[in-house]
Amino acid sequence: MEKSTFEQMGGTYYQQGDYFLPNFSVPESAPVGIWGVRHLCYLKKHRQAIYTAMLLSDKLNSYLAEIDQQAQVMFSQLVKQIAGHEKITEHLKESNQLEWVRKMNNVGMIGANLSPLKYDMVVSNPPYMKMTKDSPEAKAMPDVCYGAPNLYLLSFTSDNVKQYYNDARRNKYSNVSVLLGKLAQKGLIMDDPNAERKTPKAYILTSQGINYVENYTPKEETEKKHTKVRKPQKKKESAYGGIDVDSLNLSKYPDVKSLKEFKEKMMTILYIITNEKAGEWFTTTDALCLMTDIFGEAATKDQVNGVFKREKLWFKAENVDGSNREVKRKLLNKGIEYAQSLVGGTE
């Protein structure tokens, strides 16, 4: 008798009454507990694509078993930490069992109750993502483990916090140790009493910290910072604004426009004003006014200040009365000599 395709592939049969049935065996899989079941519900409701892909690739059960195992370890650690924090000890259980039961009921972790509401609420991935109450993730939180389960009062260090920021795709805090120090000062976290004394230091959330997380309400709209509109500064008036050009005897001097360099023009103008006794002290505003408004030359504040700073030996400088920032200058001998070389020594 010719072998079937199944037999050609190495398959065998066993007889069950009048029938030959193929020897199929389902591989044993690790049991999935309550945490794995919760995560399965989450995948079905909110991550259909991931659920289908894992189901078709036969990886779903092993994945859920791993999640369940991780959650159970964290849950057991959490129970010990809470019991230590609330001083619920074996000695108390032996000496006063009713008091022990009362305290365990208060923290919501007695017997087979695997869905307490006070401490094992899963709140996304640390550092506790902020979301609106109506978002699908927020509605699913009481019933599912979101990713690797993260439970309140789970011990954490600065290294863990750095990884949490990375996993949450948030900008990393510049100094995590300082951040944890500030949280500890505010009473939101405390040293983990059950952790080994080593570096980095381990912390847990305090009851005040848990209350802060549970009652936190995210701001729906970020308030925009009001930027101050800078008022345009009032233009400073120069004492030379109303000077009479005819009184300067310009015919005695060369035409300023015939000079090439800005420094030559500026020094000639200051010399004319000084020589004609129309003034002797000049602020930056004064020099700018004389060049642009009186003599019609193009000039900027930076150009005027540039001459003052580069040729310090040509000027005597003093602060303007009542001002520590504004400076006035007058020509010294070296400045006068330079100007006279331009105008031909006119007296």
Image (cartoon, rainbow, N blue to C red):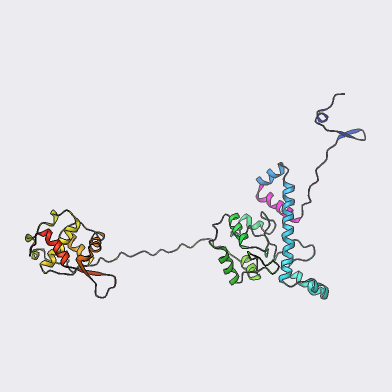
Q: 192 or 108, which is in the foreground? A: 192
First to last magenta residue range: 24-48
The residue depicted at 87 percent of the width and 33 percent of the height is 13
Q: Quadrant of the N terminus?
A: top right
Locate residue 322, reporting x and y percent: 26, 75
Estimate the x, y position of residue 120 in percent, counting from the top left.
70, 62
Residue 75: image location, x then y, percent? 73, 61
Q: Is residue 324 above or below residue 145?
A: below
State left or right for residue 249 relative to residue 86. Answer: left
Using residue 244 as the reference point, say whether residue 119 is left or right of it: right
Residue 115 visible: no
171 drawn magenta: no
Q: Residue at x 79, y 62 (%)?
A: 112
Q: Quadrant of residue 79?
A: bottom right
Image coordinates for residue 288, horizontal then vertical, percent: 21, 62
Q: Is residue 177 visible to the viewer in this orientation of the structure? A: yes
Question: Which corner quadrant holds the C terminus?
Answer: bottom left
- For image coordinates 63% across by 55% down, the residue present is 137
